[in-house]
Image (tube, grey):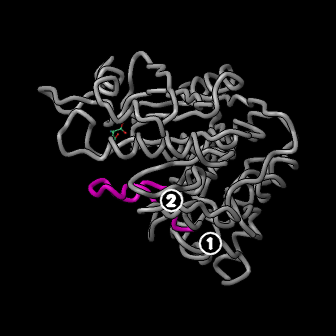
Amino acid sequence: MKKKILILNTGGTISSVQTETGYEPAPGYIAAAMQSIPAFRHPDLPSYHIEEYNPLLDSSNMTVSDWNRIASDIATHYDQYDGFVIFHGTDTMAYTASALSFMLENLAKPVIMTGSQIPLSEIRNDALDNIITSLWLCAHQPIQEVCIYFNQRLLRGNRAQKVSAELFNAFDSPNCPHLARVGIHIELNHELLRPAPQQAFCLQPITPQFIANFRLFPGFATDVLDFLLQSPLRGLILETYGAGNAQNNDPRFLELLLAASARGIIIINCSQCQQGRVSMNQYATGYSLKQAGLISGHDMTPEAAHCKLLYLLSKNIPLDKVKILIEQDLCGELSH
Ligand code: ASP
């Protein structure tokens, strides 16, 4: 039987047309264009229904409430469809993919996010293949997780990062192998795919939380961090150097972090490097962060760490439990 896929069109370049002020998502455009392209009626493709968001968004405008809407649309239609394809702008797609991977607990169906660097409305575009292959993967492969499909790459959503504002290879997952080799043949990396969940699917919405990512740079004023930590902050993703290192010749910096951890602010140590992992025992400059109460983000991307913290804080569980879960692999976002 033909599979049924729900497409959620949230906006982005993929559904844009050229206007006097640059590309803008155009209501109704994608549905009309797909209707007029014979490839979308090919027997190898699933049947699909498009739900278009109003307003269509450039993904730079997305907020937690948009993530909740996408997740709740998937939950509402979970039993009616075999899989879900989300058209989304590329700018914040890695954040949405990470957030959804946590929110859609015990997911047993494919959720594939895609977009494009050139709109479908242009003659030279990367949208057509991204849509066709996303639909095909959704209908024919045993995917049970949130992925990004983009320019012949199938990536785990919570491992992906936008790596190019220019090339068709806009996304990569530098710390996690690709989930498929896509060429003349499509070969899934079955060992890497998420296994079938043991429990029933359920949705965990997220509530906005006062958290921040702070990227260290040489010579930053400790006062900036002080200011941030004095606010009613609940959590901080500290983006450190290399294997999770930061200056340890500035006692005030370490005292501020220690005092904030003692007040219950969760501080996650994530590396600025795209490959490798945080290892706070490797250098004295990392060890002092461990002593200051930082939790290791291991090999999580800063995007995934941010969304995971939001998700865990939204569950209203004790802080000790949040700290333990931060360091555990919940849905493929982290490896030990
Ligand atoms: N600014 C656009 C967006 O993120 C970029 C894109 O879709 O490629 O919505």
Is residue 40 left or right of 245 when viewed as pictured?
left
Return the disc, 2 or 1, that comes first in the chain's sequence. 2
Q: Residue at x 73, y 48 (%)?
A: 265
Which region is colored magenta? 161-175
Tell me residue 201's x, y (percent): 79, 33
Task: Name the kind of residue labelled 2 in the image.
Answer: Ile
Ligand 1 shows up in which quadrant of the image?
top left
Q: Residue 164 colored magenta?
A: yes
Mark 1 lies on a secondary structure that is loop
Tell me residue 101's x, y (percent): 65, 43
Q: Quadrant of residue 146?
A: top right
Is residue 99 left or right of 124 when viewed as pictured?
right
Nearest the viewer among 90 and 195 is 195
Mark 2 lies on a secondary structure that is strand
Is residue 194 left or right of 50 when viewed as pictured?
right
Numbered label attached to residue 244: 1
The residue at which mark 2 appears reads as 186
Q: Residue at x 66, y 76 (%)?
A: 286
> Crowding near pointer 2: few (<14 within 10 Å), some, many (20+)?
few
